Image: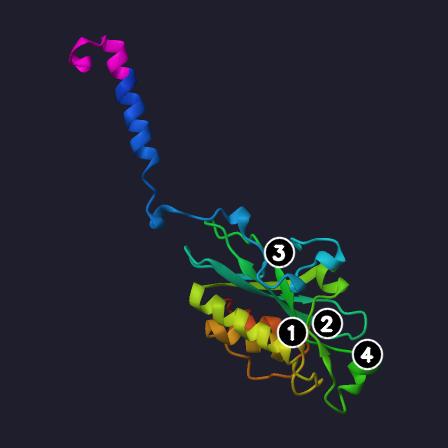
Amino acid sequence: MNIASTASAPFKVLLASVFATSLAACQSAPSSEVSVSPSAYTAEIPELTCAAHGSVKGAAAKLTANRTRPGDPAYMEFRQRLSPGIPSGHMYVVFGRLDDKGNPVTRQYNGLFPKGSLLGLYGGAIIPMPAELKPSYSDCNFTTGAAYRVSLTEAQYQRLLSKVRANLANPPLWTMFGFNCNNYAASLGTVAGLVEPSNRALPSFAYIYAYIEVNGDKKPPAKKPV
């Protein structure tokens, strides 16, 4: 007996539906269609988040300049803030992943500052001093004076991660007039082809604006006619 020919129409529809569902369940989606939601991203270097200072996600900053290309998966952000120990302020880098709209979904903080508080800070004017690279309470909680975001390709981001990991394993020495927080931040910027301003000894509150301008992302203010 031919079951298919004698079955009622509703039963035929049910059989077809079950067969189609079973067939689909046996097939896996192509790997190109598998994606990771931005919310699933985690920091590649957890010790550089602000978790120890109250926030794994860190804090957003008002951008002074922004060079974000559509489609880039990552970013680095140069930030400047006030410093209780020195009038010039402090410059550091925040980096992480971007969502498909170009918004940060992870923030990791990395900057160079001398160990030993004020002793290390002013001692670095004379001799190179051992340095810290992990975020401080001030990095995570102080208001940012200026911020410059540059998006990165995956290859650039991997180079950045490699540089940061190498620096954590072997921290560079800090010197006030040779290799300070500004110069360290700029050394990370080389992964994106960024360059330092001609005057490498500017205080942080001026250096960040010179850094933005020399890399073509903000025109200098027009000079007043004489």
User: Which sits in the foreground, 76 or 49?
Assistant: 49
> Could you say which disc has been placed on residue 89 in the image?
2
> Could you say which disc has been placed on residue 206 in the image?
1
* Image side of residue 127 versus residue 202, left or right: right
The magenta-colored residue range is 1-13
Distance between the alpha carbons at the discs numbered 4 and 1: 25 Å
> Could you say which disc has been placed on residue 62 in the image?
3
Q: Tell which circle, 1 or 3, labels the residue nearer the N-terminal end.
A: 3
Locate the N terminus by quadrant.
top left
Tell me which secondary structure the magenta stretch mostly adopts: helix
1 or 3: mark nearer the eye: 3
At label 4, counting other C-alpha atoms closer than 10 Å, the crowd grade (few under 14, some 14-19, many 20 or more) is: some
Distance between the alpha carbons at the discs numbered 3 and 2: 17 Å
Q: Position of residue 127 (x, y in %)?
A: 75, 91
At label 1, counting other C-alpha atoms closer than 10 Å, the crowd grade (few under 14, some 14-19, many 20 or more) is: some
Q: Residue at x 31, y 23 (%)?
A: 18
Marks 4 & 1, CB-CB < 8 Å contact: no
Q: Position of residue 56 (x, y in %)?
A: 67, 54
What amino acid is at disc 1? Answer: Ala
Marks 1 & 3, CB-CB < 8 Å contact: no
What amino acid is at disc 4? Answer: Gly
> Could you say which disc has been placed on residue 116 in the image?
4
- Element carrying mark 1: helix
At label 2, counting other C-alpha atoms closer than 10 Å, the crowd grade (few under 14, some 14-19, many 20 or more) is: some
* Image side of residue 178 versus residue 69, left or right: right
